[in-house]
Amino acid sequence: MIKLVRGLSINGKMLLALMFSGLLSMLIASVCLAVLEIKQFKDSAQHDLQITAKGIASRTDAALLFDDKNLAGENLLVLAGLPEVIAACVYDETDTIFAWFSKSILNQADCPLPLGTQQAGFNGLQLVVIEPMVVDGQKTGTVYIRSDLGDKFWLKLKFIATLFVVLLLTSIVTFMLASPVLKLISKPIDALVGTVKNMTLTKDYSLRATKVNNDELGMLVDAFNRLMAKVEQQNLALTQAKDRYLALYDDNPTIILNLNQEGRILSANASGADQLGYRVDELLNQLVYAYTHPEDLETMRGFIEFCMDTPSQIHRQEIRMTRQGGQIIWVRESARVIENENHTLGLLLVCEDITEAYLLNEKIAYQSSHDVLTGLANRRQFEDFANQLIYHAQAESSEHLLCYLDVDQFKVINDTCGHLAGDELIRQLGELLRTHLRRGDLAARLGGDEFGVLIRNCPAGQIFNAGNNLREIVNKFQFLWENSAYSVTASIGMVAINRFSSNALDLFREADAACYAAKDSGRNRVHLYSLDDIELVKRQGEMQWVSKIHQGIEQNRFCLFGQPIAACFGIEGLHFETLIRYVEDDGKIIAPGMFLPAAERYNLSPNLDRWVIGELFRWLAGKPEFLAKLSLCSVNLSGLSICDETVLAYVHEQFTQWRIPADKICFEITETAAIANLSSAIKFINSLKEIGCLFSLDDFGSGLSSFAYLKSFPVDFLKIDGTFVKGILDDRVDLAMVRSINEVSHVLGKKTIAEFVENRQIFDLLKLLGVDYAQGYGIGKPVPLDALKPEMAKPFPVG
């Protein structure tokens, strides 16, 4: 009906309005008239019948008093003259029928019993009147009258219908007279509407309406034309602004959603819909929870509720959303309550895709607590877990176990098969430990080939069983690489975690010392730390040197000594070996044997080597006269340094900085270090020999010596180990060893230096054997660099 009315013209609507108002007025008037007439009819009929009942009641009192039913019946016969009365009854004080009157054949049956159930008033078109008879305040009886008003009612309806027809005819005449007048109003409006329609269809806002009259409609046309002129001006600006807004909104790289309070999407930008994998129309009227990760639904609901409860604030959170196809993205949501166009509160939700940053943060967080190669916990997480176990041990008197595993001979596999094989071995060992630990225990990679294991609830009586189980797990493991199988063993240091444990750092130090004790005992061993263990006390002493070494380098507590090396034949310039010493606070000089083992064990040797080279070169550069008379200065390098490319780069930098002649510097490396790092040593040596440096192989003969590798090993000197030299006067084997080493060296074009030359007899014998140089207390003791003199190049006075 409403659609039909909306489709009518303005003239039709005014005619319809006139017709509707006339008919409605007529209908209302008719209904009101009918209601009033019927009400008046009912009130009048009830009043008249009530008066009649009261009259009968007053005349029948005596009949009831004297029990005269005939008199009562005669009083009721008065009602026979009233055509609408159907029946009348008189009841005594007990509501028993005393007399009656009826126009039907039922007679007494028209008097209802019991009377108490009857109600006075209208029942349809029948009217019931019940009038009590009261004498001196006492009820003596009741008059009951029932009448049928149907005939009178229909007469009244005919009267009302007549009035309705008259009103209808009046309305029709009025409508016919008003129709031409309405056209005078609707015609200019139709013309204006036509202009608007044409403007809407053509989007031509230059069209103007035609003014017909100078009345109010004419003024409306003028106002419309002025408005259209302004609209035409603003339309261009609005179009440009809309284009800019759509570019900002739809092309915004974030997801922009307008939600109602239920979380239903009212609008979305195109770029945001595309990021979710949908079209904009597919998102509209959908709940935002449909695109929220299931695990974050409660968080999202709480977030929206909190935003609506605090509308003045901007709220932010990070949450997961699901794209079409199930892909999960992390977004940073910023939300603020806004008022929508229908004046209801909504929520503007701007979601920035931070998946890449979140995953990167997760990766960084994971890497900060896990080892990249094995996926095990790293040292930091291992330390945190150890501190937790210490706390539980102290709070609950529980006992736990920390195991420090070091893979035996890992370097052999790493150097023989390559770094890829070494990495794969470490990875497989990590997986092996992970799969064999109980739930609640923790395995970690602490270093290159070092692992840590924390075993919860391990009483003292089970420590060795737990440690040996770990050792056996590793021992039974076979590493396969390029069709070859390698057996792997581990040395394990153990320390109990109990209520006496203090902190994780102390535990690590104790476990590390126990691990080295296991290695020194033959490897593939377990060793439990205890306070009265002499070997561990020694290790702890070395560990104490770690901080002193760092402190010594930072505070320049080291100093350099030099021990002369004399030529066995002829006289050469000063040749000495540079030695390092540590100076205590009280000025006491500490020999290198006290701190070099700790430096080697804890990878501090390269730091010491850098300090020695830098300090030596600085000293030589400040002594130009001494440098001019210097024949050769030997500097010791550790095995770790020759494998460290940064040390090599540092040496080159020092030569460049201090301009020390390279041919006056000879670097000494031990035979053991050279063999263990053969390829790295050759690369290191060749790099420095290119600029003129010399090299010496120190302590030759102390290791598993092999003359074969000397053919290609580019050193200039061989230092014969002093353990052979000091016994050549009395031991034929030592003599033979020195002779053979010297002879082979000369054949290979290398010069020899004998160590531990303590007296003239040894020197003379070495000279007889053809050894080139001698070094030892018999030649000269180590002295500070400033005490070195050129005459120290002479071994013994002649005579």
Image (cartoon, rainbow, N blue to C red):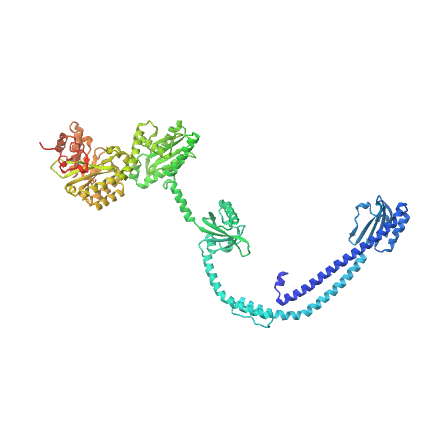
* Quadrant location, the N terminus: bottom right
Determine if residue 89 is in view. Answer: yes
Instruction: Please tell me which residue is depicted at 45% across the width and 49% down the height of the picture.
Output: 332
Return the residue nearer the eye: 24 or 329. 24
* Quadrant location, the C terminus: top left
Q: Vertical placement of 584 versus 21: above or below?
A: above
Farthest-out residue, left: 799
Position of residue 527 in the picture relative to residue 693 (left or right): right
Q: Dividing the picture into quarters, in which one does residue 776 lie?
A: top left
User: Number of labelled discs?
Assistant: 0
x%, y% of residue 542? 29, 33
x%, y% of residue 289? 51, 48
Position of residue 597 in the picture relative to residue 212 (left or right): left
x%, y% of residue 65? 89, 45
Q: Vertical placement of 130 versus 443: above or below?
A: below
Determine if residue 149 is in view. Answer: no
Q: Dividing the picture into quarters, in which one does residue 414 lie?
A: top left
Return the residue nearer the eye: 513 or 22. 22
Q: Dividing the picture into quarters, in which one does residue 742 lie?
A: top left
x%, y% of residue 415? 29, 39
Instruction: Please tell me which residue is depicted at 55% across the width and 55% down the height of the picture.
Output: 343
